[in-house]
Amino acid sequence: MMSEVAVEEISALTAIFCEKDEFELLGQSETEGLTFRIQLTVDGYTEKLLLKLIFHLPLDYPSSLPDVSVSSEQLTRKQCIDIKLGLLKKATTLVSEPMVHELLLWLQQNFTTVAEQSVRYQSPRGDCEQRSQGETRTALLQVDHMRAKTKYKKIIEKWTSQLGLTGRLFIGKLILILLQGERKSIKDYLLLQKTSKVDVDSNGKKCKEKMMSVLCEMQLPCGCKQLPAFEVKDYSSLEELKTEFELVGLLELYHKYVHMLV
C-alpha cells in the first residue's frame, strides 16, 4: 500500500495541475506503486518550453527517491537527460518528505541554469579527437550481478550513448563496467546507475542497483587514447578478460584493480 503521505501528495498535484493534459495517472499497483505524467511549462531563453515528466513513486516513497523520465519535442535527448539528473540530485536533498511539487518548482526556477550546463558539456561531433588527454577520465565499476541481463545491458548502452561515454561492459565471472569520458559525464552516469531501477530482485520486481562499487576513477593513463565506442564483451575465462584489458592498453589497470578480485 502507498503511504498516506504519497496519496495526499497525488491529491494535491491533481488539484494544482488541473488543466487539460497537465496531469495523468498512468498506473497504480499494490506492488509497484504509482506512475503519473505531468506536463510542465518552463521559460526558455526565447520561448516557453513544454516538458513531459513521468514520475514513478515506489511503495516506500518518500523514504526512497522517485524514478523520473523527461521528454520534450523542443529539447535534445542530452538536454532531457541532464534535466533528469538535475532533478535526481535535488531529490537527494528531500528524502523522507513529499518532493514532487518541490522538484517541479525547483525546475521552473532553475531551468535556464540546468540548460546552460547541458549546452556547456555538449560536444560537437568529432570533438573527441580534439579533447586533451588531461580532460579524459577512466572509471572502473563492478556490478555484483545482473538478473535481467538483456534489459540491464540495453540501459547501460543507452546511458553511455546519451552521456558521450565510451568503454566496455565485461560480462563473465566478474561484471565490470569500464567508462571513459569527461568527469561530469562519469559522475552523471554513477548517479543514474544508483538511482534508477535497472534490474529485478529475487521476486522479479524492478529494483535499483545497490551492490555496485567504484574500483577506481582516474585520469586516462599517459599514452592511452580514449576508446572510440562503448561495447559489450562476454568472456569465458579470466585469461580472456585479461587479454581484453591488454587490447585496450589497460593491462596495468587489470593487475591493480581486477586481479585482486579473483
Image: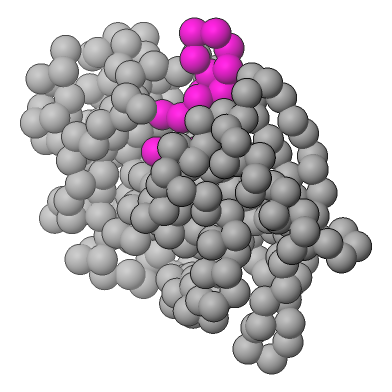
Which residue is at 25% across, 13% downward?
A: 238
Q: Is residue 45 left or right of residue 183?
A: right
Which residue is at 60% across, 60% downward?
A: 101
In the depicted view, which residue is nearer to us: 140 or 98?
Answer: 98
Q: What is the quadrant of residue 261 in the picture?
A: top left
* Residue 7 magenta: no
Q: What is the quadrant of residue 212 in the picture?
A: top left
Question: In the rendered view, would you say 20 is above or below 145?
Answer: below
Q: Is residue 18 left or right of residue 71?
A: right
In the depicted view, which residue is nearer to us: 142 or 42?
Answer: 42
Q: Is residue 247 visible?
A: no
Magenta residue span: 193-209
Residue 209: percent from left, percent from top: 41, 29
Which residue is at 69% across, 54% downward?
A: 12
**Residue at the outermost right position:** 20
Q: Is residue 49 visible?
A: yes
Q: Is residue 237 left or right of residue 201?
A: left
Q: Is residue 257 left or right of residue 53?
A: left
Residue 198: percent from left, percent from top: 51, 30
| Quadrant in which the N terminus appears | top right
In the depicted view, which residue is nearer to us: 217 or 84?
Answer: 84
Label total for image? 0
**Residue at the outermost bottom position:** 46
| Quadrant in which the C terminus appears | top left
Residue 180: percent from left, percent from top: 33, 50
Q: What is the quadrant of residue 132 in the picture?
A: bottom left
Question: In the rendered view, would you say 147 is above or below 49?
Answer: above
Residue 193: percent from left, percent from top: 42, 39
Question: In the rendered view, would you say 103 is above or below 61?
Answer: below
Which residue is at 46% across, 30% downward?
A: 208
Instruction: Describe the colour scheme in one phrase.
Output: one colour
